[in-house]
Image: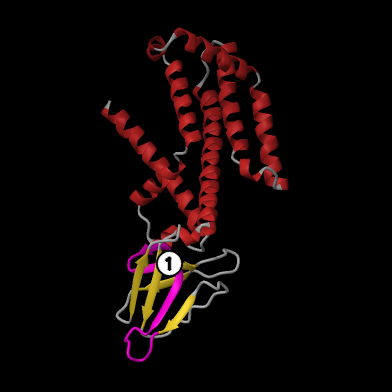
Amino acid sequence: MINIVVAQASFIAALMFYMGVIYTSAYYGHFHLSPFFLGFGFAEFVLQSLHLMTFPVLVGAVVLLIAVAISGRRPRQALPGGLVRVASLGTSVLARYYLVVVVAGLVLVVLWWVWQLLLPYRWLGPLLIGLGLLLGEVRRIDVDHTPRGLRDTAVPIFAAGVFLLWTVTLAAGQLGEQDARNAERDVIQRTGLVVFSAKRLGLTSRSPDLHFEDLGNSVHLRYRYTGLRLIAARDGRYYAVPIGWSAKTDHVYVLREADGMRIELTPGVQ
């Protein structure tokens, strides 16, 4: 029992780490940064994967758990008989048309890969292919009741696992890109930075909201910069963008704490 729990926990942790890497790479890649350059660790990648715990994902997980419970003998007895019959009937009906599901997935993959169509749903193609392969195994069990060899069973299940992993990769990357675009659009709401420096920093931007002010010779930190918003802060470095930042045209500023610089954090504008 301990070995089973440890193995399942290790698999879940590895999957969350993988999803976190894909998500953070897509998110910070939009801001021309890399999570590895920022120094993210294993625990941070795992926590970042929680961004994928959206309502549709949770609903799908519940449905998957019910399906797994129905597939077992004892859990099946613990569930209502009507639910078991409906689920078994639905699975059998879908299994009859597993080739249709696989072909539909292949069509979606071709539309996305070749013609760049249905980009918001590019994860749906590999998902349908993986589900179709699993339904094909269910169909073979219903039709052929004789035991099959390990190779005949392992190959389609492994292929289905590869396509489902591809689905997770596409979904995590798409969600990271979407969250990054939302952050770019609402960048004014992020934590603000006011930078005081003893020397000119030479920060330039097309944004009219990036302001520079000379406080005079009597002030040690005489140069003040405002209109910046924080993207990330790591190891004494602040990664900031100006208000109105655009991923296609603007820079990301890397500001490092030093004796000749003071950085103040302010609330974002709601």
Q: Residues within 10 Å of mark 1 (few under 14, many from 20)?
A: many
Looking at the rendered structure, the number of numbered marks drawn on it comes to 1
Magenta-colored span = 215-239
In which image quadrant can residue 133 be found?
Answer: top right
Taking the spot 56% from the left edge, 21% from the top edge, the residue there is: 137
The overriding secondary structure of the stretch rendered in magenta is strand
Is residue 218 highlighted in magenta?
yes
Q: Residue furthest bottom?
A: 217
Q: Is 169 placed above or below 37 here?
A: above
* Residue furthest to the top: 81
Q: Which residue is mark 1?
A: 239
Image location (x, y in percent) of residue 20: 43, 48
> Could you tell me which residue is drawn at 58 percent across and 22 percent down?
135
The three-letter amino acid code for the residue at tag 1 is: Tyr
Residue 192 location, x and y as percent? Answer: 41, 65
Q: Position of residue 200 (x, y in %)?
A: 43, 84
Which quarter of the figure is the N terminus placed in?
top left
Q: Quadrant where the C terminus lies? A: bottom left
Which of the 4 quarters of the picture holds residue 129? top right
Res 96 → quadrant: top right
Look at the image and tell me whether residue 265 can be seen: yes
Name the one closer to the observer, 243 or 140. Answer: 243
**Residue 189 colored in magenta in the image:** no
Q: Is residue 18 visible?
A: no
